[in-house]
Amino acid sequence: MADDQILGEVSLPGMLQDMVLESSDVNEFLDGLAKLAADAMSSEDKEMFCGVTLLRPRSKGSVASSSEQARLMDEVQYQFDDGPCIRAAREGQVYVVADFRSESRFGDYTGAIINHGVRSALGVPIPLDGLAAAGLDLYSTRPNAFDEAVIAAAVDLAREASKSLRMAVRVAHLADTGEQLRAAMNSRTTIDVAAGIIMGQNRCSHDTAMTILKAASSGRNVKLADIAAAVVTSIGQQLPETHFDA
């Protein structure tokens, strides 16, 4: 079976790009990708279950699944922190399991996934550019479900998906950075207001007011922004908020 027969006569790059534009966040895009992969790889006599793992720096892995059964299969990997998809994502190489009953690479994970009725699996890395690591995981209840044509089609799908996923991860990274910036600016504004209150109450300079705030923060082991917020609310004022023009 040729790759184009597996994937169907569709504009895959266009479809994936539309998914990015229509998704509200990375997880929604990953859910769509998992369902797309499961549909593309399944046939009338062979159902595939699909999961997608995204490992981002300083954040927990995002897991998307094509179905509830696929989600349960992926949870087994996370329980053991091992499996073809996790290894594919971390190591950047394809993992093929012809039959878990004769598999010896994954330790206790193997017995656990067999108990879920899984006999074969395919883990394919989704190439990214350093912002994250990702893997596409396909499961089957049949042994030897992944022939060369299916493996090649999954690799092609992962390669195409990587372009759109990079875009989605960058958007998420920018959104995270924007939220962090807003939080930092709001904290800065609150600290400045608190310093002004202390200056008015004690008739002191801004430097002296900041020294007082920092001493209270250090002495109470409380964040400076929280100390400042307490000063502002203590005189009945609402916490200030920094506004950003669109």
Image: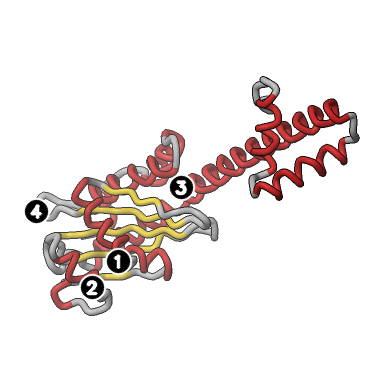
| Label ID, residue 80 | 1
Sequence-wise, the earlier of marks 4 and 2 is 4
**Viewer-closest of 188 and 177:** 188
Does 234 sit above or below residue 121? above
Tell me the kind of residue under disc 4: Asp
- The residue at 24%/69% (across/down) is 109
31 sits to left or right of 40: right
Q: How packed is label 1: few (under 14 Cα within 10 Å), some, or many (20 or more)?
A: some
- The residue at 15%/62% (across/down) is 118
Tell me the kind of residue under disc 1: Phe
- The residue at 46%/60% (across/down) is 133
Find out whether the residues at labels 1 and 2 contact each other: C-beta distance under 8 Å. yes
Sequence-wise, the earlier of marks 1 and 2 is 1
Find out whether the residues at labels 2 and 3 contact each other: C-beta distance under 8 Å. no
Q: Nearer the viewer, mark 2 or mark 3?
A: 2
User: Quick one: SS at disc 1?
Assistant: helix
Check disc 4 and report the residue beneath it: 45
Give the Cα distance between marks 1 and 2.
Answer: 8 Å
**Viewer-closest of 156 and 240:** 240
Does 52 sit above or below residue 35? below
- The residue at 50%/51% (across/down) is 166
Give the Cα distance between marks 2 and 3.
Answer: 34 Å
| Label ID, residue 108 | 2
Tell me the kind of residue under disc 2: Asp
Tell me the kind of residue under disc 3: Ser
